[in-house]
Structures are given as structure tokens and as C-alpha cells.
Image: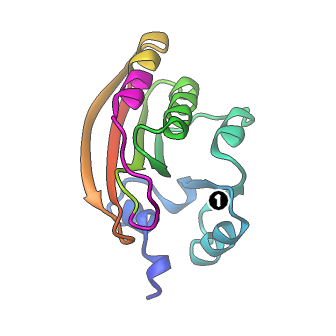
Amino acid sequence: MNPKSWNELRQLWSCGFITPSQFHGVNDSEQIIQENRLYHPEAQFRLGNWVDVIWNEPRFNPGFIYLDTQYIVGHKPMARIAEATLTLCPRDTFVVINGELNNPYSCATKRSEDSLLEVFSRCFAIVKGWEQVTTFQYRSSYHSLMKSFMIYRR
């Protein structure tokens, strides 16, 4: 089996969390979209910037979002994408936001999580019903230390 065909998508499907037809992927890389369509023809993929795509989607009504970023936790781009996502999500949405704590291929390293936690607090105050469920850390296949934030809107 090609390693690219066994990724987070297959893991979500194999555990029964979602079905392939429920998956809608967004990426701003044409190459990644083409590879994903090749390896996962049963899922749907859209080319574009995540925030632009969800902002312009008139029927944006997810039950689950797996926002897998390559942003460093605590940097402004991660805070911006988290804020845009949480602001647009309807009730009964479970969101997992992944970010890097370090990247062995760049000089960027984790900053304080305060800016991201401030975004969560601000969104939780503006859009009622959000609560942070948990966080966990893991090492990616590219050797980056990652952190996932799990958030639920009642």
C-alpha cells in the first residue's frame, strides 16, 4: 500500500468516525489535491485557501472539522485560521486544530500558545457554546512535534 494512501483520512474512516463520502478536503496546492483525488476518489476535494472556501460556501454546515495546519502554534497565521473557523461553525460541531510545535526543516519554533488561547477565549465569548475538550501532542511522520486542540460547540 502506498504510504500516501494511508493517512489521516483513512484513519478517520477505518475507525468509523466519518465515511469517505462525508469528507470534504481543502488545500491550496493543486498537486496535493490531485494526489488526494487519486488515492481517495470517494472523497471530495476543493482547491483554495481554507478560510476563503468556508467563507464562500453557502451551505457550510460541518459536524466535524479536522483542520490540519502546518502553522506553528502561537504564530499569527494559526490564530487567524482558528478564529475564522470557529466564528463560522454552527452548533454541534467538533473541531480538531493541528499545529506544529517545531519544524525540523525550518528555524521556526513554537511561541507561546497564549495568542491561540486568546483566540479561543475571544471566540468562546462571541460565539456561545464553544468549549475546549482537550489537547494532545504527537510526533508527525515528518518528525515535527505537533499539538492538537479539540474543541466542541454545543
Where residue 97 appears, as percent x and y from the top left, is 42, 43
**134 drawn magenta:** no
Q: Quadrant of residue 15?
A: bottom left
Is there any visible trace of residue 152 in the rendered image? yes
Above or below residue 62? Residue 8 is below
How many neighbours does mark 1 have within 10 angstroms: few (below 14), some (14-19), or many (20 or more)? some
The magenta segment: 104-120
141, 4: nearer the viewer: 141
State the SS at label 1: strand
From the image, which quarter does the C terminus lie in?
top left
Where residue 4 appears, as percent x and y from the top left, is 49, 78
Residue identifier under label 1: 44
**116 drawn magenta:** yes
108, 62: nearer the viewer: 108
Residue 71 shown left or right of residue 43 in the figure: left
> Which residue sits at x=36%, y=55%?
102
Name the residue at the bottom extreme. 1
